[in-house]
Amino acid sequence: MVKSVLNKNNYIFLPFLILLMFLAFIYPSQIKDYFEFIDWKTITVLISLLITTTAIKESSFFIKITERLIYKIDNEKKLALTLIILSSILSMFFTNDIALFIVVPLTLTFQTYLQNNLQKLVIFEAISVNVGAALTPIGSPQNLFLWHQWDISFVSFVVKMLPLFFVLFIFLILFSLIIFPSKKLSIKEFDRGTVLNKRLFYLSIPLLLLCVISVEFSFSFFALVVIFFIYLFFFKNILLRVDWLLILLFIIMFIDFHIVSQIPFVSSFITQFDLQDPGSVFTLSLFSAQIISNVPASIFMSKFSNDWFAIAYGVNVSGNGFIIGSLANIIAMRFVNTKKIWIDFHKYSIPYFAVTAVLVYIVFF
């Protein structure tokens, strides 16, 4: 299992590892300080969050709910809206990549029993998890970092992000209503033999709440110890299914972009902009995330600005656009893994990104 996870995520991990090796060669004197460059509190919370959300996914609770819903849906537009909304809701609480690991395999399973082509729906599910994840501090790694970095309360973070989520979500629904036809679904009987692990689900929900509360009241390390050992003793297979490479990736990104932000020509380029202006910070965050993805962009921009609000809006809007804007996009497209899906993704994501980016800038900045 661990080996398969590594193989599947090499295409995300390797560029940042190569960058680290290059920086170590260019700036060897900084190697001794790497440990200090890492935000270990964020890493601690991320580990707790990944363990608990992976457990909830593995319990199959949401797969069982969706299997029941599918028989009540009679056309493609309703199916699309149902799964798009479900993707957004799941990503608010279980991170965008975990939400994809629940919804996309289920969508592709339905494809076997439908005459309708659902690959386009996978693209919209990728957009949807980025939209839903924007709302909460545990919806995505970049939000988790920003939440912890500026010590914002959970409720305050949600309140600040709610207007952005509202704009992104409303436009996503309007876009979906236009794109998906009201074509009749032809559903055959399919295997509903997924086994629900109630014990795992009911154990994991309070542990997820413990993870959130631990950040609010500053006992995240203690919470991680409790969460880790509970799963070790009762469901140790869950620990093997956690995406540990994502933790290592996050650690490497902390080091990479701490060093990059101190490179003179990079620092000079960024500081020539008015970083006291929220609009400038939003724009820089927006376009840097299109180049290096939203997680490293949030780390990078935090080195130059304390305006977490503008950074958060920029990197979350930028989750859609070019596929590199969010690692979740790449994960979703890899499920389908055809050349056409990568082209089709941009056919829908770039117009969505362009309209929402302009709209958010005009309304909020």
Image (spheres, grey):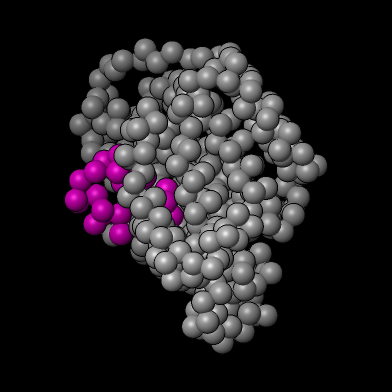
Q: Which residue is found at the position 64% from the left and 53% from the top? A: 39
Residue 160: x %, y % from top left: 69, 58
Q: Nearer the viewer, residue 191 or 301?
A: 301
Residue 283, given in percent of the width and then of the height, sits at 53, 74
- Work out whether residue 122 or residue 286 is closer to the camera in this orientation and state it: 286
Residue 108 in the figure: left or right of residue 329: left
> In the picture provided, is 202 more to the left or to the right than 65?
right
- On the rendered image, what quadrant is the C terminus found in? bottom right
Does any portion of residue 305 appear in the rendered image?
A: yes
Single out the residue that lies furthest toward the right.
217
- Residue at the image position 19 percent from the left and 51 percent from the top: 340
Question: Along the line of sight, which residue is nearer the eye, 276 or 165?
Answer: 276
Where residue 36 appears, as percent x and y from the top left, is: 64, 57
Using residue 355 as the reference point, say whether residue 45 is left or right of it.
right
Q: Give the dominant element type of the magenta stretch: helix, strand or loop.
A: helix
Q: Residue at x 20, y 31 (%)?
A: 115
Quarter of the figure with the N terminus: top left
Residue 24: x and y in percent read 45, 64
In the image, residue 87 sits, relative to residue 262, either above or below, namely: above
Instruction: Please identify the residue farthest to the bottom as the structure is shown.
Output: 272
Residue 365 appears in the figure: no
Relative to 195, 221 lies left or right: right
| Residue at 43% across, 71% down | 26
Find the magenta span and give its range. 324-346
